Amino acid sequence: MRRAVLLLLLPVLALPACEHEGDRPFVAPVAVYADTKPTSDQDFVAVASAPRDARPDEVGLATWYGTQFAGKKTANGERFDPNALTAAHRHLPFGTWVEVRRPDTGRSIRVRINDRGPWGDDRRVIDLSRAAAVQLDIVGMGVAPVEIRVVHGPS
């Protein structure tokens, strides 16, 4: 019998004993997953948040993917919608919300992780849906520097 809700608790990753002063560990979010296929961004909630003045969890380049993948299954099993505020990340749990900020313009957007990637270039840290790329104004450029912070939900 299927359970209504699967609670996935991820341990907090600890830094090795030789950490440098000023380093901080990546805190893995605690994610709540609905057992059914998601119908909206509220079906997945990552309960982790970052204060506004917090350092980013990751810094790198963002790229985007759009209509050529529309309707195809993402790594978490849902269908890709280029108009949804979603993204692909290499290791964050599905359903985790992240704030993606362009330090050069100050623009930011919150997206839900529902796919894996980007692949091929380690400088690329996130692949955004077309809708997220439009809001960050990177569609024409194709790639832009970003900071990523794990946050609590879409707003």
Image (tube, rainbow, N blue to C red):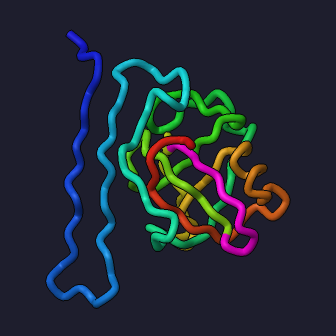
The residue sitting at 33% across, 66% down in the picture is 26
Q: Quadrant of the N terminus?
A: top left
Q: Position of residue 81 (x, y in %)?
A: 65, 32
Residue 108 magenta: yes
Q: How many marks?
A: 0
* 132 relative to 44 in the view: left or right: right
Q: Position of residue 5 (x, y in %)?
A: 28, 23
Q: Position of residue 152 (x, y in %)?
A: 44, 47
- First to last magenta residue range: 103-112
The residue sitting at 80% across, 55% down in the picture is 139
* Along the line of sight, the residue nearer the viewer: 138 or 48: 48
* 50 relative to 32 in the view: left or right: right
**Image quadrant in which you'd find residue 143:** bottom right
**Image quadrant in which you'd find residue 154:** top right
The residue sitting at 29% across, 90% down in the picture is 21
* Along the line of sight, the residue nearer the viewer: 44 or 82: 44
Q: Is residue 74 above or below residue 79?
A: below
The outermost residue toward the top is: 1
* Along the line of sight, the residue nearer the viewer: 22 or 116: 22
The outermost residue toward the left is: 17
